[in-house]
Image (cartoon, grey):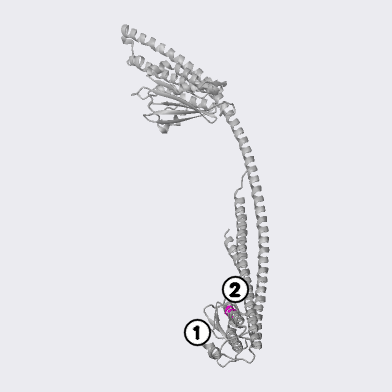
Amino acid sequence: MNVGPKCACLVLAACFVLAGCSDGKGQDDVWYGYYYDDLRENAEGALSRPYRTAQECRIAMQDYTMEAKVTSGFACARGCAPPRDGAIANCREVVR
Amino acid sequence: MVLDLRAPISLRGKWIGMILLGFVALAGIVGSAAILMTMNQRQMDGVAHAYQVERQVSAMRVSLLRIDSFRRKRDIERRADELKTYRTRLESAIASFRTLTSDNPRQQARVPLLEALQAQVLLDVGAITKEEFGESIRVEDPLGMLDVLTRAMQDEELRLQRFRGAEMRRIQYGFYVVLGAAGLLLIVVALLTFVSLRRFTLDLVNSRQALRDANAGLELAVQERTADLKRANGELQRFAYIVSHDLRSPLVNVMGFTSELELATKRLGEMLVEARRTRPETLFPGTDELIEQDLPEAIHFIRTSTQKMDRLINAILQLSRQGSRALTPTWLDMNRLLGDVVESMKMRAEQAGAQIIIAPEQPEIYCDRVAIEQIMSNLIENAIKYRQPDRPPVIRITGKRIGSHAEFRVADNGRGIDPRDFERVFDLFRRSGAQDQPGEGIGLANVRAVVYRLGGSILLESELGVGSTFILSIPLHYSEEQSQVS
Protein backbone atom coordinates (compact mmCIF):
# COMPACT_ATOMS: atom_id res chain seq x y z
CA MET A 1 0.00 0.00 0.00
CA ASN A 2 2.90 2.39 0.55
CA VAL A 3 3.60 2.62 -3.20
CA GLY A 4 0.12 4.01 -3.78
CA PRO A 5 0.73 7.70 -2.93
CA LYS A 6 3.98 7.77 -4.95
CA CYS A 7 2.30 6.32 -7.99
CA ALA A 8 -0.63 8.69 -7.57
CA CYS A 9 1.75 11.67 -7.48
CA LEU A 10 3.53 10.42 -10.59
CA VAL A 11 0.26 10.00 -12.44
CA LEU A 12 -0.90 13.47 -11.41
CA ALA A 13 2.42 15.01 -12.46
CA ALA A 14 2.18 13.24 -15.81
CA CYS A 15 -1.34 14.55 -16.27
CA PHE A 16 -0.28 18.11 -15.54
CA VAL A 17 2.65 17.88 -17.93
CA LEU A 18 0.34 16.42 -20.54
CA ALA A 19 -2.00 19.33 -20.02
CA GLY A 20 0.83 21.77 -20.63
CA CYS A 21 0.87 23.16 -17.13
CA SER A 22 4.63 23.12 -17.02
CA ASP A 23 4.91 25.91 -19.64
CA GLY A 24 6.64 28.92 -18.18
CA LYS A 25 5.61 32.50 -18.81
CA GLY A 26 9.12 33.92 -18.72
CA GLN A 27 10.51 36.39 -16.25
CA ASP A 28 7.55 38.56 -15.31
CA ASP A 29 9.46 41.36 -13.59
CA VAL A 30 11.99 42.05 -16.36
CA TRP A 31 11.30 44.56 -19.11
CA TYR A 32 12.53 44.11 -22.66
CA GLY A 33 12.57 46.58 -25.53
CA TYR A 34 11.15 45.33 -28.83
CA TYR A 35 12.41 47.31 -31.82
CA TYR A 36 10.83 47.00 -35.26
CA ASP A 37 12.75 48.37 -38.19
CA ASP A 38 9.80 48.47 -40.58
CA LEU A 39 6.34 48.43 -39.11
CA ARG A 40 4.82 47.84 -42.53
CA GLU A 41 6.05 44.29 -42.33
CA ASN A 42 5.67 41.60 -39.70
CA ALA A 43 9.31 40.69 -39.55
CA GLU A 44 10.60 39.61 -36.14
CA GLY A 45 11.72 42.59 -34.07
CA ALA A 46 15.01 43.06 -32.32
CA LEU A 47 15.10 42.33 -28.61
CA SER A 48 16.96 44.63 -26.26
CA ARG A 49 18.81 43.71 -23.09
CA PRO A 50 16.64 43.39 -19.98
CA TYR A 51 15.72 46.46 -17.90
CA ARG A 52 14.53 46.65 -14.35
CA THR A 53 11.80 49.27 -14.98
CA ALA A 54 9.59 50.32 -17.84
CA GLN A 55 11.00 53.84 -17.61
CA GLU A 56 14.59 52.66 -18.09
CA CYS A 57 13.51 50.56 -21.05
CA ARG A 58 11.58 53.41 -22.65
CA ILE A 59 14.41 55.93 -22.31
CA ALA A 60 16.90 53.47 -23.74
CA MET A 61 14.65 52.65 -26.64
CA GLN A 62 13.92 56.33 -27.38
CA ASP A 63 17.65 57.04 -27.50
CA TYR A 64 18.14 54.12 -29.79
CA THR A 65 15.37 55.15 -32.20
CA MET A 66 16.19 58.86 -32.18
CA GLU A 67 17.64 58.81 -35.65
CA ALA A 68 15.55 55.94 -36.98
CA LYS A 69 13.27 56.18 -39.98
CA VAL A 70 9.57 57.03 -39.82
CA THR A 71 8.35 53.50 -40.37
CA SER A 72 10.27 52.07 -37.45
CA GLY A 73 8.90 51.73 -33.90
CA PHE A 74 9.37 50.18 -30.53
CA ALA A 75 7.57 49.10 -27.37
CA CYS A 76 8.63 47.90 -23.98
CA ALA A 77 6.97 44.82 -22.53
CA ARG A 78 7.20 42.30 -19.75
CA GLY A 79 5.76 38.89 -19.02
CA CYS A 80 5.59 37.86 -22.67
CA ALA A 81 5.40 34.25 -23.77
CA PRO A 82 8.27 33.10 -25.98
CA PRO A 83 7.68 34.14 -29.62
CA ARG A 84 5.84 31.58 -31.71
CA ASP A 85 6.08 31.86 -35.45
CA GLY A 86 7.51 35.36 -35.01
CA ALA A 87 4.46 36.64 -33.13
CA ILE A 88 4.59 37.91 -29.61
CA ALA A 89 1.33 38.32 -27.76
CA ASN A 90 -0.18 37.77 -24.35
CA CYS A 91 2.36 40.05 -22.66
CA ARG A 92 1.44 40.97 -19.14
CA GLU A 93 2.16 44.66 -19.74
CA VAL A 94 3.20 46.75 -22.77
CA VAL A 95 4.19 50.44 -22.69
CA ARG A 96 5.49 52.99 -25.16
CA MET B 1 -10.12 -28.07 8.90
CA VAL B 2 -8.02 -24.90 9.32
CA LEU B 3 -9.32 -21.57 8.10
CA ASP B 4 -6.49 -19.46 6.67
CA LEU B 5 -7.96 -15.96 6.72
CA ARG B 6 -4.66 -14.06 6.68
CA ALA B 7 -3.74 -14.64 3.03
CA PRO B 8 -7.01 -13.30 1.61
CA ILE B 9 -6.72 -10.20 3.81
CA SER B 10 -3.24 -9.27 2.53
CA LEU B 11 -4.35 -10.00 -1.01
CA ARG B 12 -7.40 -7.84 -0.44
CA GLY B 13 -5.17 -4.98 0.69
CA LYS B 14 -3.23 -5.12 -2.57
CA TRP B 15 -6.36 -5.19 -4.67
CA ILE B 16 -7.92 -2.32 -2.79
CA GLY B 17 -4.65 -0.40 -3.16
CA MET B 18 -4.70 -0.92 -6.90
CA ILE B 19 -8.32 0.15 -7.19
CA LEU B 20 -7.64 3.24 -5.08
CA LEU B 21 -4.67 4.01 -7.30
CA GLY B 22 -6.94 3.73 -10.31
CA PHE B 23 -9.41 6.14 -8.78
CA VAL B 24 -6.64 8.60 -7.92
CA ALA B 25 -5.43 8.42 -11.53
CA LEU B 26 -8.98 9.01 -12.70
CA ALA B 27 -9.24 12.03 -10.44
CA GLY B 28 -5.95 13.29 -11.91
CA ILE B 29 -7.29 12.83 -15.41
CA VAL B 30 -10.47 14.69 -14.57
CA GLY B 31 -8.32 17.53 -13.16
CA SER B 32 -6.16 17.52 -16.30
CA ALA B 33 -9.23 17.61 -18.48
CA ALA B 34 -10.49 20.62 -16.55
CA ILE B 35 -7.13 22.36 -17.01
CA LEU B 36 -7.14 21.55 -20.72
CA MET B 37 -10.63 22.97 -21.02
CA THR B 38 -9.50 26.17 -19.33
CA MET B 39 -6.51 26.45 -21.64
CA ASN B 40 -8.72 25.84 -24.66
CA GLN B 41 -11.11 28.51 -23.47
CA ARG B 42 -8.16 30.89 -23.17
CA GLN B 43 -7.10 30.20 -26.74
CA MET B 44 -10.68 30.66 -27.93
CA ASP B 45 -10.78 33.99 -26.18
CA GLY B 46 -7.49 34.84 -27.92
CA VAL B 47 -8.94 33.98 -31.33
CA ALA B 48 -12.05 36.04 -30.61
CA HIS B 49 -9.77 38.84 -29.47
CA ALA B 50 -7.78 38.66 -32.70
CA TYR B 51 -11.03 38.84 -34.70
CA GLN B 52 -12.02 41.88 -32.69
CA VAL B 53 -8.70 43.59 -33.44
CA GLU B 54 -9.04 42.73 -37.11
CA ARG B 55 -12.52 44.24 -37.14
CA GLN B 56 -11.18 47.45 -35.63
CA VAL B 57 -8.42 47.57 -38.25
CA SER B 58 -11.02 47.11 -40.98
CA ALA B 59 -13.14 49.87 -39.46
CA MET B 60 -10.03 52.04 -39.43
CA ARG B 61 -9.36 51.37 -43.11
CA VAL B 62 -12.95 52.08 -44.13
CA SER B 63 -13.07 55.31 -42.13
CA LEU B 64 -9.76 56.48 -43.63
CA LEU B 65 -10.91 55.72 -47.16
CA ARG B 66 -14.14 57.59 -46.57
CA ILE B 67 -12.31 60.57 -45.17
CA ASP B 68 -9.91 60.54 -48.11
CA SER B 69 -12.86 60.66 -50.50
CA PHE B 70 -13.64 64.10 -49.11
CA ARG B 71 -10.26 65.36 -50.32
CA ARG B 72 -11.04 64.29 -53.87
CA LYS B 73 -14.57 65.67 -53.98
CA ARG B 74 -13.86 68.95 -52.22
CA ASP B 75 -17.28 69.20 -50.70
CA ILE B 76 -16.26 69.25 -47.11
CA GLU B 77 -18.59 72.04 -46.11
CA ARG B 78 -21.64 70.28 -47.53
CA ARG B 79 -20.78 66.97 -45.88
CA ALA B 80 -19.28 68.26 -42.65
CA ASP B 81 -21.48 66.08 -40.48
CA GLU B 82 -20.58 63.00 -42.47
CA LEU B 83 -16.87 63.80 -42.14
CA LYS B 84 -17.29 64.29 -38.45
CA THR B 85 -18.92 60.89 -38.14
CA TYR B 86 -16.11 59.11 -39.97
CA ARG B 87 -13.49 61.03 -38.00
CA THR B 88 -15.15 59.93 -34.78
CA ARG B 89 -15.31 56.34 -36.03
CA LEU B 90 -11.65 56.46 -36.98
CA GLU B 91 -10.61 57.81 -33.61
CA SER B 92 -12.74 55.25 -31.86
CA ALA B 93 -11.28 52.44 -33.96
CA ILE B 94 -7.71 53.58 -33.22
CA ALA B 95 -8.49 53.87 -29.48
CA SER B 96 -10.02 50.37 -29.47
CA PHE B 97 -7.04 49.03 -31.37
CA ARG B 98 -4.72 50.59 -28.80
CA THR B 99 -6.64 49.00 -25.97
CA LEU B 100 -7.16 45.62 -27.59
CA THR B 101 -3.50 45.21 -28.53
CA SER B 102 -2.18 46.23 -25.14
CA ASP B 103 -0.55 42.75 -24.83
CA ASN B 104 1.23 42.94 -28.20
CA PRO B 105 4.41 45.06 -28.46
CA ARG B 106 4.50 45.08 -32.27
CA GLN B 107 0.95 46.38 -32.64
CA GLN B 108 1.57 48.89 -29.88
CA ALA B 109 4.71 50.07 -31.70
CA ARG B 110 2.51 50.81 -34.72
CA VAL B 111 0.14 53.09 -32.82
CA PRO B 112 2.28 56.31 -33.05
CA LEU B 113 2.74 55.88 -36.79
CA LEU B 114 -0.95 55.16 -37.18
CA GLU B 115 -1.90 58.29 -35.27
CA ALA B 116 0.54 60.37 -37.33
CA LEU B 117 -0.90 59.07 -40.58
CA GLN B 118 -4.42 59.74 -39.33
CA ALA B 119 -3.48 63.32 -38.49
CA GLN B 120 -1.91 63.83 -41.92
CA VAL B 121 -5.04 62.53 -43.71
CA LEU B 122 -7.26 64.75 -41.58
CA LEU B 123 -5.01 67.74 -42.38
CA ASP B 124 -5.14 66.91 -46.05
CA VAL B 125 -8.94 67.00 -46.12
CA GLY B 126 -8.96 70.09 -43.94
CA ALA B 127 -10.55 68.44 -40.97
CA ILE B 128 -7.80 69.80 -38.73
CA THR B 129 -5.60 72.86 -38.89
CA LYS B 130 -1.81 73.00 -39.24
CA GLU B 131 -1.60 74.12 -35.66
CA GLU B 132 -3.54 71.09 -34.57
CA PHE B 133 -1.30 68.91 -36.73
CA GLY B 134 1.78 70.36 -34.99
CA GLU B 135 5.18 68.63 -35.34
CA SER B 136 3.84 65.29 -36.46
CA ILE B 137 5.75 63.33 -39.04
CA ARG B 138 4.78 63.61 -42.67
CA VAL B 139 4.95 61.03 -45.40
CA GLU B 140 4.52 61.32 -49.12
CA ASP B 141 1.64 58.90 -49.55
CA PRO B 142 -0.14 58.58 -46.24
CA LEU B 143 -3.03 56.55 -47.61
CA GLY B 144 -0.74 54.16 -49.35
CA MET B 145 1.28 53.71 -46.23
CA LEU B 146 -1.88 53.31 -44.19
CA ASP B 147 -3.02 50.65 -46.55
CA VAL B 148 0.25 48.75 -46.19
CA LEU B 149 0.33 49.29 -42.43
CA THR B 150 -3.21 48.15 -41.79
CA ARG B 151 -2.69 45.09 -43.95
CA ALA B 152 0.38 44.25 -41.88
CA MET B 153 -1.71 44.75 -38.74
CA GLN B 154 -4.37 42.44 -40.10
CA ASP B 155 -1.75 39.91 -41.12
CA GLU B 156 -0.37 40.01 -37.60
CA GLU B 157 -3.80 39.22 -36.17
CA LEU B 158 -4.38 36.53 -38.76
CA ARG B 159 -1.07 34.99 -37.82
CA LEU B 160 -2.10 35.09 -34.15
CA GLN B 161 -5.40 33.50 -35.07
CA ARG B 162 -3.63 30.73 -36.93
CA PHE B 163 -1.23 30.24 -34.07
CA ARG B 164 -4.05 30.15 -31.53
CA GLY B 165 -6.08 27.86 -33.73
CA ALA B 166 -3.10 25.49 -33.86
CA GLU B 167 -2.82 25.72 -30.07
CA MET B 168 -6.51 24.89 -29.77
CA ARG B 169 -6.07 21.87 -31.99
CA ARG B 170 -3.09 20.78 -29.90
CA ILE B 171 -5.11 21.17 -26.73
CA GLN B 172 -8.00 19.30 -28.29
CA TYR B 173 -5.61 16.54 -29.23
CA GLY B 174 -4.33 16.48 -25.64
CA PHE B 175 -7.92 16.41 -24.44
CA TYR B 176 -8.67 13.40 -26.60
CA VAL B 177 -5.53 11.69 -25.31
CA VAL B 178 -6.64 12.37 -21.73
CA LEU B 179 -10.14 11.20 -22.58
CA GLY B 180 -8.72 8.00 -24.07
CA ALA B 181 -6.53 7.48 -21.02
CA ALA B 182 -9.55 8.04 -18.79
CA GLY B 183 -11.52 5.49 -20.77
CA LEU B 184 -8.69 2.98 -20.54
CA LEU B 185 -8.29 3.62 -16.84
CA LEU B 186 -12.01 3.25 -16.34
CA ILE B 187 -11.87 -0.11 -18.07
CA VAL B 188 -8.85 -1.15 -15.98
CA VAL B 189 -10.48 0.01 -12.73
CA ALA B 190 -13.74 -1.67 -13.69
CA LEU B 191 -11.85 -4.88 -14.48
CA LEU B 192 -9.90 -4.66 -11.23
CA THR B 193 -13.11 -4.04 -9.30
CA PHE B 194 -14.81 -6.93 -11.03
CA VAL B 195 -11.88 -9.28 -10.47
CA SER B 196 -11.47 -8.26 -6.83
CA LEU B 197 -15.20 -8.54 -6.19
CA ARG B 198 -15.21 -11.95 -7.78
CA ARG B 199 -12.21 -12.97 -5.72
CA PHE B 200 -13.74 -11.64 -2.50
CA THR B 201 -16.97 -13.44 -3.27
CA LEU B 202 -15.08 -16.66 -3.90
CA ASP B 203 -13.13 -16.13 -0.68
CA LEU B 204 -16.36 -15.54 1.15
CA VAL B 205 -18.00 -18.61 -0.32
CA ASN B 206 -14.94 -20.71 0.47
CA SER B 207 -14.75 -19.33 4.00
CA ARG B 208 -18.44 -19.98 4.52
CA GLN B 209 -18.06 -23.51 3.21
CA ALA B 210 -15.02 -24.08 5.41
CA LEU B 211 -16.94 -22.72 8.38
CA ARG B 212 -19.89 -24.96 7.56
CA ASP B 213 -17.58 -27.95 7.28
CA ALA B 214 -15.88 -26.98 10.52
CA ASN B 215 -19.27 -26.63 12.22
CA ALA B 216 -20.40 -29.98 10.90
CA GLY B 217 -17.16 -31.53 12.13
CA LEU B 218 -17.57 -29.80 15.44
CA GLU B 219 -21.13 -31.00 15.79
CA LEU B 220 -20.02 -34.51 15.03
CA ALA B 221 -17.15 -34.22 17.47
CA VAL B 222 -19.53 -32.91 20.15
CA GLN B 223 -21.88 -35.80 19.52
CA GLU B 224 -19.02 -38.27 19.73
CA ARG B 225 -17.70 -36.69 22.92
CA THR B 226 -21.18 -36.61 24.43
CA ALA B 227 -21.65 -40.28 23.61
CA ASP B 228 -18.25 -41.03 25.13
CA LEU B 229 -19.11 -39.03 28.22
CA LYS B 230 -22.47 -40.72 28.56
CA ARG B 231 -20.80 -44.07 28.24
CA ALA B 232 -18.12 -43.16 30.77
CA ASN B 233 -20.73 -41.69 33.09
CA GLY B 234 -22.83 -44.81 32.82
CA GLU B 235 -19.81 -46.90 33.66
CA LEU B 236 -19.05 -44.65 36.62
CA GLN B 237 -22.61 -44.97 37.84
CA ARG B 238 -22.47 -48.70 37.53
CA PHE B 239 -19.10 -48.69 39.23
CA ALA B 240 -20.44 -46.49 42.05
CA TYR B 241 -23.45 -48.72 42.41
CA ILE B 242 -21.41 -51.90 42.46
CA VAL B 243 -18.77 -50.48 44.77
CA SER B 244 -21.28 -49.03 47.22
CA HIS B 245 -23.40 -52.13 47.07
CA ASP B 246 -20.42 -54.44 47.60
CA LEU B 247 -18.99 -52.21 50.32
CA ARG B 248 -22.27 -52.29 52.09
CA SER B 249 -22.26 -56.05 52.63
CA PRO B 250 -19.08 -56.14 54.79
CA LEU B 251 -20.24 -52.93 56.45
CA VAL B 252 -23.48 -54.59 57.46
CA ASN B 253 -21.38 -57.45 58.88
CA VAL B 254 -19.19 -54.98 60.77
CA MET B 255 -22.28 -53.24 62.10
CA GLY B 256 -23.85 -56.59 63.09
CA PHE B 257 -20.74 -57.79 64.84
CA THR B 258 -20.42 -54.42 66.54
CA SER B 259 -23.87 -55.03 68.00
CA GLU B 260 -22.63 -58.47 69.09
CA LEU B 261 -19.61 -56.84 70.65
CA GLU B 262 -21.91 -54.38 72.40
CA LEU B 263 -23.95 -57.21 73.85
CA ALA B 264 -20.80 -59.07 74.86
CA THR B 265 -19.43 -55.98 76.54
CA LYS B 266 -22.71 -55.52 78.37
CA ARG B 267 -22.52 -59.16 79.53
CA LEU B 268 -18.90 -58.72 80.56
CA GLY B 269 -19.91 -55.67 82.57
CA GLU B 270 -22.53 -57.70 84.40
CA MET B 271 -19.97 -60.44 85.03
CA LEU B 272 -17.52 -57.91 86.34
CA VAL B 273 -20.08 -56.57 88.80
CA GLU B 274 -20.77 -60.13 89.95
CA ALA B 275 -17.08 -60.98 90.31
CA ARG B 276 -16.36 -57.75 92.13
CA ARG B 277 -19.10 -58.66 94.59
CA THR B 278 -18.33 -62.39 95.09
CA ARG B 279 -14.64 -62.99 94.30
CA PRO B 280 -12.86 -59.70 93.99
CA GLU B 281 -9.42 -61.33 94.48
CA THR B 282 -9.69 -63.09 91.12
CA LEU B 283 -9.79 -59.82 89.18
CA PHE B 284 -6.57 -58.65 87.54
CA PRO B 285 -5.67 -55.04 88.05
CA GLY B 286 -7.02 -52.86 85.22
CA THR B 287 -9.84 -55.27 84.33
CA ASP B 288 -12.46 -52.75 85.49
CA GLU B 289 -11.10 -50.00 83.28
CA LEU B 290 -10.81 -52.31 80.29
CA ILE B 291 -14.38 -53.57 80.51
CA GLU B 292 -16.17 -50.44 81.64
CA GLN B 293 -14.30 -47.75 79.70
CA ASP B 294 -12.00 -48.92 76.91
CA LEU B 295 -14.28 -51.49 75.33
CA PRO B 296 -17.46 -49.33 75.24
CA GLU B 297 -15.44 -46.42 73.94
CA ALA B 298 -13.94 -48.50 71.12
CA ILE B 299 -17.32 -49.92 70.24
CA HIS B 300 -18.81 -46.43 70.18
CA PHE B 301 -16.12 -45.28 67.73
CA ILE B 302 -16.72 -48.30 65.53
CA ARG B 303 -20.45 -47.68 65.56
CA THR B 304 -20.30 -43.97 64.71
CA SER B 305 -17.76 -44.66 61.97
CA THR B 306 -19.77 -47.47 60.44
CA GLN B 307 -22.94 -45.37 60.65
CA LYS B 308 -21.24 -42.51 58.86
CA MET B 309 -19.87 -44.87 56.28
CA ASP B 310 -23.35 -46.28 55.84
CA ARG B 311 -24.75 -42.82 55.21
CA LEU B 312 -22.05 -42.06 52.67
CA ILE B 313 -22.59 -45.32 50.84
CA ASN B 314 -26.32 -44.65 50.85
CA ALA B 315 -25.68 -41.24 49.33
CA ILE B 316 -23.56 -42.72 46.56
CA LEU B 317 -26.20 -45.32 45.92
CA GLN B 318 -28.88 -42.68 45.83
CA LEU B 319 -26.91 -40.62 43.30
CA SER B 320 -26.17 -43.60 41.10
CA ARG B 321 -29.83 -44.59 41.20
CA GLN B 322 -30.80 -41.03 40.36
CA GLY B 323 -28.70 -41.18 37.20
CA SER B 324 -30.25 -44.39 36.06
CA ARG B 325 -33.82 -43.46 36.86
CA ALA B 326 -35.97 -43.03 33.75
CA LEU B 327 -37.42 -39.52 33.47
CA THR B 328 -41.10 -39.19 32.61
CA PRO B 329 -41.75 -35.64 31.47
CA THR B 330 -45.21 -34.16 31.74
CA TRP B 331 -46.75 -30.68 31.74
CA LEU B 332 -46.26 -29.22 35.19
CA ASP B 333 -48.28 -26.46 36.76
CA MET B 334 -45.47 -25.02 38.80
CA ASN B 335 -47.77 -23.03 41.13
CA ARG B 336 -49.44 -26.23 42.12
CA LEU B 337 -46.23 -28.27 42.29
CA LEU B 338 -44.51 -25.71 44.49
CA GLY B 339 -47.61 -25.51 46.69
CA ASP B 340 -47.48 -29.30 47.16
CA VAL B 341 -43.76 -29.21 47.99
CA VAL B 342 -44.28 -26.45 50.56
CA GLU B 343 -47.25 -28.32 52.02
CA SER B 344 -45.12 -31.44 52.47
CA MET B 345 -42.63 -29.39 54.45
CA LYS B 346 -45.24 -27.54 56.48
CA MET B 347 -44.28 -29.16 59.77
CA ARG B 348 -40.59 -28.30 59.48
CA ALA B 349 -41.37 -24.79 58.32
CA GLU B 350 -43.69 -24.19 61.27
CA GLN B 351 -41.08 -25.51 63.69
CA ALA B 352 -38.55 -23.09 62.28
CA GLY B 353 -41.09 -20.25 62.13
CA ALA B 354 -40.38 -19.98 58.40
CA GLN B 355 -42.47 -18.07 55.91
CA ILE B 356 -42.47 -19.47 52.39
CA ILE B 357 -43.81 -17.17 49.67
CA ILE B 358 -44.57 -18.51 46.21
CA ALA B 359 -44.92 -15.77 43.62
CA PRO B 360 -48.01 -16.11 41.39
CA GLU B 361 -47.93 -16.96 37.67
CA GLN B 362 -45.09 -19.43 37.72
CA PRO B 363 -44.29 -20.65 34.19
CA GLU B 364 -45.61 -24.00 33.12
CA ILE B 365 -42.92 -26.48 32.08
CA TYR B 366 -42.77 -29.87 30.44
CA CYS B 367 -40.49 -31.82 32.74
CA ASP B 368 -40.09 -34.72 35.15
CA ARG B 369 -42.21 -34.11 38.26
CA VAL B 370 -40.09 -36.14 40.68
CA ALA B 371 -36.91 -34.40 39.60
CA ILE B 372 -38.40 -30.92 40.02
CA GLU B 373 -39.90 -31.83 43.39
CA GLN B 374 -36.55 -33.20 44.50
CA ILE B 375 -34.75 -29.98 43.44
CA MET B 376 -37.26 -27.65 45.08
CA SER B 377 -37.48 -29.72 48.27
CA ASN B 378 -33.72 -29.70 48.64
CA LEU B 379 -33.43 -25.96 48.09
CA ILE B 380 -36.30 -25.08 50.44
CA GLU B 381 -35.05 -27.51 53.05
CA ASN B 382 -31.57 -25.97 52.90
CA ALA B 383 -33.08 -22.49 53.24
CA ILE B 384 -34.88 -23.56 56.40
CA LYS B 385 -31.92 -25.51 57.75
CA TYR B 386 -29.23 -22.88 57.27
CA ARG B 387 -31.18 -19.92 58.62
CA GLN B 388 -29.72 -16.92 60.44
CA PRO B 389 -30.30 -17.63 64.14
CA ASP B 390 -31.55 -14.15 64.99
CA ARG B 391 -34.40 -13.98 62.45
CA PRO B 392 -37.12 -16.32 61.20
CA PRO B 393 -36.53 -17.63 57.69
CA VAL B 394 -38.33 -15.95 54.79
CA ILE B 395 -38.14 -17.89 51.54
CA ARG B 396 -39.34 -16.44 48.24
CA ILE B 397 -39.83 -18.55 45.14
CA THR B 398 -40.25 -16.69 41.86
CA GLY B 399 -40.34 -17.88 38.30
CA LYS B 400 -40.42 -16.42 34.78
CA ARG B 401 -39.88 -17.40 31.17
CA ILE B 402 -36.58 -16.38 29.54
CA GLY B 403 -36.48 -17.47 25.93
CA SER B 404 -36.75 -21.24 25.74
CA HIS B 405 -36.05 -21.62 29.46
CA ALA B 406 -37.86 -21.07 32.72
CA GLU B 407 -35.93 -19.36 35.46
CA PHE B 408 -36.82 -20.09 39.08
CA ARG B 409 -35.26 -18.27 41.97
CA VAL B 410 -35.28 -19.59 45.51
CA ALA B 411 -34.17 -16.71 47.72
CA ASP B 412 -33.76 -16.81 51.48
CA ASN B 413 -32.59 -14.54 54.26
CA GLY B 414 -30.39 -17.20 55.82
CA ARG B 415 -26.81 -17.08 56.94
CA GLY B 416 -25.44 -16.96 53.39
CA ILE B 417 -22.53 -18.70 51.76
CA ASP B 418 -18.98 -17.47 51.44
CA PRO B 419 -18.33 -16.59 47.76
CA ARG B 420 -15.25 -18.80 47.88
CA ASP B 421 -17.56 -21.79 48.51
CA PHE B 422 -19.99 -21.12 45.65
CA GLU B 423 -18.59 -24.01 43.62
CA ARG B 424 -17.69 -26.21 46.57
CA VAL B 425 -21.26 -26.41 47.92
CA PHE B 426 -22.30 -28.29 44.79
CA ASP B 427 -19.58 -30.92 45.24
CA LEU B 428 -20.39 -34.27 46.80
CA PHE B 429 -19.68 -34.54 50.56
CA ARG B 430 -18.61 -30.88 50.69
CA ARG B 431 -20.27 -28.37 52.99
CA SER B 432 -19.78 -24.69 53.67
CA GLY B 433 -19.78 -22.61 56.85
CA ALA B 434 -20.26 -23.87 60.39
CA GLN B 435 -20.96 -27.64 60.55
CA ASP B 436 -23.72 -27.20 63.13
CA GLN B 437 -26.45 -28.93 61.18
CA PRO B 438 -26.80 -32.63 60.40
CA GLY B 439 -25.99 -33.59 56.84
CA GLU B 440 -23.43 -35.27 54.63
CA GLY B 441 -23.11 -32.69 51.88
CA ILE B 442 -25.06 -34.57 49.26
CA GLY B 443 -28.18 -32.37 48.86
CA LEU B 444 -26.85 -29.72 46.48
CA ALA B 445 -24.66 -32.24 44.65
CA ASN B 446 -27.79 -34.21 43.99
CA VAL B 447 -29.65 -31.04 42.94
CA ARG B 448 -26.98 -30.10 40.42
CA ALA B 449 -26.85 -33.64 39.03
CA VAL B 450 -30.62 -33.62 38.53
CA VAL B 451 -30.60 -30.11 37.00
CA TYR B 452 -27.89 -31.12 34.56
CA ARG B 453 -29.83 -34.19 33.67
CA LEU B 454 -32.82 -32.02 32.83
CA GLY B 455 -30.64 -29.91 30.50
CA GLY B 456 -30.62 -26.95 32.84
CA SER B 457 -28.16 -25.07 34.98
CA ILE B 458 -27.98 -23.75 38.51
CA LEU B 459 -26.25 -20.63 39.80
CA LEU B 460 -25.77 -19.20 43.22
CA GLU B 461 -25.80 -15.63 44.48
CA SER B 462 -25.13 -15.12 48.13
CA GLU B 463 -23.81 -12.78 50.78
CA LEU B 464 -22.70 -13.87 54.20
CA GLY B 465 -25.22 -12.86 56.85
CA VAL B 466 -27.73 -11.58 54.29
CA GLY B 467 -29.00 -14.59 52.42
CA SER B 468 -28.69 -16.76 49.34
CA THR B 469 -30.47 -17.06 46.01
CA PHE B 470 -30.34 -20.20 43.94
CA ILE B 471 -31.11 -19.47 40.28
CA LEU B 472 -32.43 -22.43 38.44
CA SER B 473 -32.70 -22.45 34.65
CA ILE B 474 -34.73 -25.33 33.23
CA PRO B 475 -35.78 -25.85 29.58
CA LEU B 476 -39.46 -25.09 29.13
CA HIS B 477 -39.78 -28.30 27.19
CA TYR B 478 -37.61 -31.21 28.25
CA SER B 479 -36.13 -33.29 25.48
CA GLU B 480 -33.62 -36.05 25.78
CA GLU B 481 -31.26 -34.30 23.30
CA GLN B 482 -31.07 -31.26 25.56
CA SER B 483 -30.30 -33.36 28.55
CA GLN B 484 -26.67 -33.12 29.55
CA VAL B 485 -24.68 -36.22 30.33
CA SER B 486 -27.07 -38.34 32.25
Nearest the camera: A4 or B78?
A: B78
Q: Position of residue B236 (x, y in %)?
A: 55, 27
Residue at the limit of the structure toward the bottom, as seen here: A67
Subunit that carries the residue with mark 1: A
Q: Secondary structure at mark 1?
A: helix
- Find residue A23 and name its label: 2
Nearest the camera: B99 or B319?
A: B99
Nearest the camera: B465 or B239?
A: B465
Nearest the camera: B191 or B170?
A: B170
Q: What residue do we see at 59% from left, 26% from top? A: B480
Q: Identify the residue position indicated by label 1 in the image.
A: A55
Number of marks in picture: 2
Q: Which residues are magenta?
A: B92-96
Q: Is residue B94 magenta?
A: yes
**Where's the N terminus of chain B, which quadrant?**
top right
Subunit that carries the residue with mark 2: A
